[in-house]
Amino acid sequence: MAGKREDGTFAPGHKLGNRFSKGVSGNRNGRPKLTKLTDALRQQIAETNPDASEETVAEQIARALIREAISGNVQAFREIADRTEGRAPVTLDVGNKDGEPMLITFNFNSNARLTDGNNNG
């Protein structure tokens, strides 16, 4: 790509390298606002169900999900495990610019971490 150095940085004066000031994301609109549907769902989930004894809709959904998992529904079990234990880390084996192996581990409970394949990173 024109304007890029071998180390991947931009040459001085290159427009793409200087689009945003340091610490500014460039997203003028900020974080997207919740939709009306999201607001309505959160409100409904927090309410108690008039057909149940003091149980919220969220509690009823959790109970139904647990029943499904107990009856053998693997997807229900996976959903419960992901939400209570955290998703299992996903590791990708890719090469760096020198062709050396590099592992990228995505842990869904924290940030991604980079290693050099020997867990040194």
Image: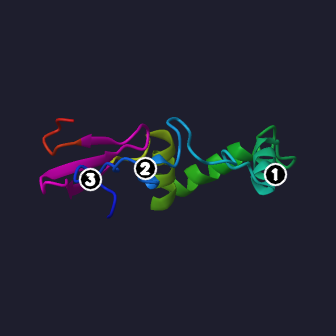
**Disc 3 residue type?**
Arg
Is residue 63 visible from the viewing direction of this image? yes
Relative to residue 71, is residue 39 drawn left or right? Answer: right
Residue 6: x and y, percent?
A: 22, 53
Which is in the foreground here, disc 1 or disc 3?
3
Amino acid under label 1?
Ala
Mark 2 highlights which residue?
Answer: 17
Residue 26 rendering spot, x and y as whole percentages: 59, 47
User: Mark 2 or mark 3, which is nearer the start of the sequence?
Assistant: 3
Give me the residue at 27% from left, 42% from top: 114
Q: Name the residue under label 1.
A: 40
Label 3 secondary element: loop
33 to the left or right of 7? right
Q: Is residue 47 magenta?
A: no
Q: How crowded is mark 1: few (under 14 residues within 10 Å), some or many (20 or more)?
A: few
N-term-proximal mark, 1 vs 3 = 3
| Identity of the residue furthest to the front in this view | 13
| Rendered-image quadrant of the C terminus | top left
Say if mark 3 contacts mark 2, CB within 8 Å: no
Query: What residue is drawn where x is 67% and y is 50%?
Result: 61
Q: In this view, does 75 lie above or below 17?
A: below
> Mark 2 is on which residue type?
Gly
Q: Position of residue 78 (x, y in %)?
A: 45, 54
Q: In which quarter of the image is the N terminus?
A: bottom left
**Disc 1 vs disc 2: which is toward the camera?**
2
What is the span of residues highlighted in magenta in the rendered image?
Answer: 90-114
**Separation (CA) of disc 1 from disc 2:** 42 Å
Residue that numbered label 3 is attached to: 5
> Is the C-beta separation of discs 1 and 2 under 8 Å?
no
Q: Which residue is drawn at 42% across and 47% down?
A: 87
47, 73: nearer the viewer: 47
